[in-house]
Amino acid sequence: MIPDLDARLAHNLDVVMAEIDAPPRGRFERLLLRARVPEPTARLVAATPTLRLAWFVSVAVVLLFAASAGDATWDDTGRLAVLLTLAPLVPVVGVALAYGSGADRAHEVSVAAPLSGLRLVLLRTATVLGASAALTLLGVLAAPSAGWLRLAWLLPAAATTATTLAVGSRLGMRTAAGLVGTGWTVLVVVIAQASGDAAAPFRAIGQLVSLVVSVLAAVALVTSRRRLEHWDGR
Amino acid sequence: MTAPTVHLDGVVVRLGERFTLAVDSLTVGPGITVVQGANGSGKSTLLRLLATVVAPDAGRITVAGRTIAAAADPADRSGRADRPAVDAALLATRRRLGYLPQHDSVPPRLRVFDHVDLVAVMRELGSDARSRRAMVHRALVAVDLDDLGAERCGRLSGGQRRRVALAAALAGGPTLLVLDEPDASLDADQIGRLTRELTERAGAATIVVATHHAAWSTTLHPTQRIQLHEGHVRRAD
């Protein structure tokens, strides 16, 4: 039928013109596609401008930590404690910068779209976490004398990030990041002063508590996902 | 997909202490509906309601006969049982929705094509990347920006950025189109193009347009006009 043929021709022309007019995909997006990340997901991650700022902040802060704690050992607990206290705040800052009406001009458009808000926030969080974790690992490898102790921030970081997301689904990500960041810092200082050991919050019990908090916060996030997926923080 | 009818029943939205939008009963049907009113009268709040961005504090909203929002009533336990159906209806509504917010929603660092494509991904347009990108191209042609696809949005004028946001709303031919001041920052030629685009789509879509320009709204040949005053519908005809 001729109308059908016309429509198909018009569609094919649009497909060709789109490939001509569209700018080439960026290096990072091509890398994601080569790693078999689904195309829409690669686009969501690579073409989200707010992530660039989050990445930049994460990179800058983590590199700063890695450099300043270059000689940290268990004997130098003061410097190590500073690294371990600040490192879990990096993904918290990243989440605050990557999601929400204050961070993303297109946030309202994304709320009105069928894409799951939980999926979007988790994608962005995973990207921020991945970037900061990879860089911290590089820092560890660059200074092997500091050993595995620098990894002691990973579980606390999972706890602070998951708590930020869970609280953020109710109060907004920036408010949540402020509350969690302040709460985390106060908690670490209080425990360290009470025990007389600056690294006390990061030893075995602290790691266990971080794990429990991560799981509880993840459950809270999943149960409150409706707030992320449905209306703008109401 | 046919143009849906949207019905608001006893809807109240409270924005802090200072502003309340209250709509006793309002039906928005296929064709173009123009929303007018002074600054602060509640136009944008009404459009954000219709675009499923703001939830009502009270009342019910239905789209194509299905409830997409019903403010929780503690005494009504049946409301909880309906939640999956409401969620499904909300998702279905968003799949047919194109939304242009009042504020500048275009990130300056993204390229024009990439921004419209990113919104298209969020709107789950197209069965695959090629057909989605074809829809993006078609939307950019509709707003006369197809030759600026590789340009960064931050390098565009205010009117061009408005057209980028408009393209993101128009892509894929949504049957529910909510446009908050789409004519803002556009020159006369582009307003003419927008008028043609909207009137062409009016036969197959429910289009809600908020504008301050009464003269332009007349050229849209609206099927309905809604006049808002201090958070209340003063006239709907």
Image: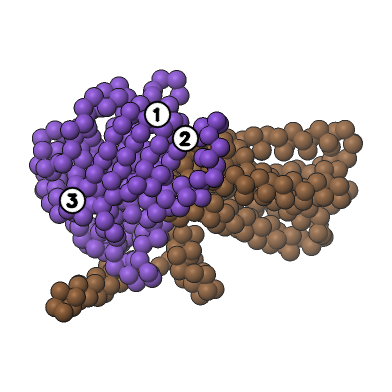
Q: How many badges with numbers are in the image?
A: 3
Chain in purple in the render: B
Tag 2, which secondary structure? loop
Sequence order check, earlier mark of 1 and 3: 1
Tell me which corner region of the image, top left, top right, bottom left or bottom right, holds residue A10: bottom left
**Left or right of residue B202, residue A200 in this image:** right
Q: Position of residue B116 (x, y in %)?
A: 33, 57
Measured in 3D between alpha carbons, the distance from the residue under mark 2 to the one under mark 1, in whole angstroms, is 9 Å
Sequence order check, earlier mark of 2 and 1: 1
The answer to whether any part of residue B106 appears in the image is: no
Residue at 33 percent of width and 54 percent of height: B96
Measured in 3D between alpha carbons, the distance from the residue under mark 3 to the one under mark 2, in whole angstroms, is 31 Å
Tell me which corner region of the image, top left, top right, bottom left or bottom right, holds residue A183: top right
Mark 1: few, some, or many residues within 10 Å (few <14, many ≥20)?
many
Mark 3: few, some, or many residues within 10 Å (few <14, many ≥20)?
many
The quadrant in which the N terminus of chain B is found is bottom left
Residue at 51 percent of width and 40 percent of height: B79
Q: Mark 3 falls within which chain?
A: B
The reply to whether discs 2 and 1 touch (Cβ–Cβ < 8 Å) is yes
- The residue type indicated by label 2 comes to Ala
Nearer the observer, A227 or B75:
B75
Tag 1, which secondary structure? strand
Sequence order check, earlier mark of 3 and 2: 2
Mark 3, residue position: B202
- The residue type indicated by label 3 comes to Ala
Residue at 48 percent of width and 63 percent of height: A41
Q: Position of residue A173 (x, y in %)?
A: 56, 41
Mark 2: few, some, or many residues within 10 Å (few <14, many ≥20)?
some
Q: Mark 2 falls within which chain?
A: B
Numbered badge on residue B12: 1
Chain A shade: brown
Numbered badge on residue B71: 2
